[in-house]
Amino acid sequence: MEIASRKAPVTLHDVAREAGVSLATASRALNGSERKVHESYRSRVLDAAARLNYTPNLSAQAVAKGGTNTVALLVADIADPYFSSIAAGVIRASEEAGLVVTMAVTERSTARELELVRALRGQRPRVMILAGSRSSTETDQDALISELQAFEATGGRVVFVSQHELPFETVAIENAEGAKQLARELVALGYRRFAAITGSRTLLTARDRLSGFVEGLAESGIEIPENRIVATEFTRDGGFDGANALLAQGLDDTELIFAVSDVMAVGALSALREAGIVPGEDIAVAGFDDIPTVRDVTPPLSTVNIPLVEVGRRAIALALSTDDTANDTITTTVVLRDSTPSR
Amino acid sequence: MEIASRKAPVTLHDVAREAGVSLATASRALNGSERKVHESYRSRVLDAAARLNYTPNLSAQAVAKGGTNTVALLVADIADPYFSSIAAGVIRASEEAGLVVTMAVTERSTARELELVRALRGQRPRVMILAGSRSSTETDQDALISELQAFEATGGRVVFVSQHELPFETVAIENAEGAKQLARELVALGYRRFAAITGSRTLLTARDRLSGFVEGLAESGIEIPENRIVATEFTRDGGFDGANALLAQGLDDTELIFAVSDVMAVGALSALREAGIVPGEDIAVAGFDDIPTVRDVTPPLSTVNIPLVEVGRRAIALALSTDDTANDTITTTVVLRDSTPSR
DNA sequence: CTGTTAGCGCTTTCAG
DNA sequence: CTGAAAGCGCTAACAG
């Protein structure tokens, strides 16, 4: 004899019986498009459903109607404020649209990303959102593309958040433009000698930001010395290490360090401080993203704002739009704070 | 004539036909428990599946087997590092166990939480994890409990992350104990006059931490003056406002401000600094949680460490354990940093 | 408007 | 070990 009698969940069938109507009527009263079932029946069904504490089996609905109300969201690292803010926007907008989001983490591995896309495809989601910057050396890239195209061929929508590199709708972020503008404003503030901490050279986001920054400086005839550009991991610790690397080779007359992301900049700040250098006084620092944290570090960090939560919302808006080829570009804006005083 | 011919997805049936075997055999080869189908057949099916780029329809599998491989995760706010770290642990552990995570955000509303639980129940997840502290004045509490019990009755597992208040398995965090220990260590450091910034009095987590702290001080005969305890929102801005409130009434001889969470403490730090007060020198500050950020603020924040990612992992470990009544308590440890120099 | 009856894609007896 | 057939819970024609 079994110990726990795992009761079977209440089904639509149970509700129909309890209400004394047919399965179809119960279905229509509970979910079918409005104004189809007589009020007296309708309320009987609703009552029965409430009494039985009925919840429609979403999987069954999905197979019956041949589609789900699911959004699959892939991010590189959910604990990173950049992604968690975007995720917040995606989730909020999805809920508003009556969609459920399932989430997976790639841990910044493109192989893992491909795996996950395959697996998530089994969910038959309506939308698949891939957030996280692309890399220029992805060997699995073709496989990813064909997987995604197969998904689209069956009616799914794919939206990328990053740069518009792949043949899919994307919420593009003005990385290069924002960095260029930042460079201009820093030059206007009086800075002339720069160093930079960037992520892997193959990471598109890092690459775009750095090249935009370099271009912006070039407009004023300024260059960053080759050896003043260090590439590390695209994380807080990467920023920390990057600053130390710069420190190790001697900062000399460097006036400002540009880190291609705020998390890196924050790490750099800590490294500098540990080395007895006062950021904002001895040397200026700027980042990119405008994550919430940067208001609370010392000094508050100058950066380029990306409306992260809005990016998430836009991604699902794009996915739900009827326009097949729509694209969306997010404008970034420079935010100057105390980490880059005018000189 | 339709423009886009939305191809129907490849089904098991297609694979079976392509491989020249029966539906049943194809099913067994692709998913059924090992060692049942002859190798020659098996490989033919696998080849066909690969050739067709087949992905099993998870919904269909779910209805056929009467269960999913889904974990439903509810958090208060995914952009909050506390929750995003826990989520990271849940997601990682879930993926390792072959489970997919669907995620919803309550925005700290218990009404919304109840709604979401009902909706998510429709997914027929195997596990439901509710992270986010309970409130002592929940009017919907009974409804939540019965909803969750109904879910358990049908074989689902429920795990709470917070305090062990409700009749469900929970990963309990030693909030009171940790705060008490923090108080002891601060007293040992020489502090005698305290102020506190807490969240709503009804928020269990806030309440436990504050009372633990108060108890810890009481062991040394120290009390926090009534008016030195301010209650604000359980967020960064709440901490900011709380510090300002304290400032407004005059900090007088207060030596240390205890904020019941790190995000609040970080906000408080900024408020103090804006007021021209140097945290760590003019006044000490301590928080709770040990979120990554606190290493990077100035001065680095003394706090009570909770292994957040581990908490997430444990939650799903608990959910997957066969022991029905298991519970798990997470030990917290005090971490002293520069925001509370010895005096 | 309501009930009957096919499926949806997949798993799982149950015979062969 | 394999295939035929009966569901799983729900929706969507299709007749009344």
Image: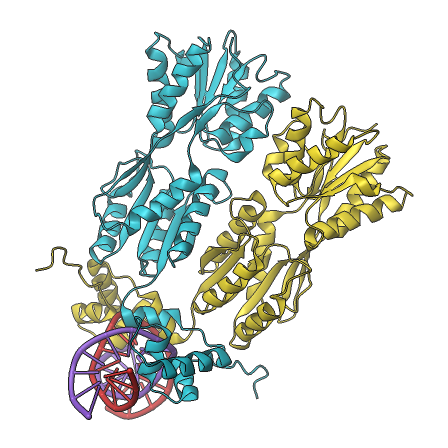
Chain colours: A yellow, B cyan, C purple, D red
Q: Residue furthest front?
A: B39
Residue B243 shown left or right of residue A192 in the figure? left
Observer-nearest of B209 and B12: B12
Question: Residue at 66% of width from left, 64% of height from top?
Answer: A327
Estimate the x, y position of residue B312 in percent, counting from the top left: 39, 44
Residue reaching furthest to the left: A1
Between B194 and B322, the residue placed more toward the observer is B322
Q: Is residue A36 visible?
A: no
Q: Nearer the viewer, residue A6 or B326?
A: B326
Residue B66, horizontal then vertical, whole percent: 27, 67
Q: Give the quadrant of residue B155.
A: bottom left
* Residue occupying the point 33% across, 63% down: B68
Q: Residue A206, relative to residue B52: is it above or below? A: above
* Residue drawn 31% across the image and 73% down it: B32
Using residue A229 as the reference point, say whether residue B274 is left or right of it.
Answer: left
Considering the image in quadrants, where does the N terminus of chain B appear?
bottom right
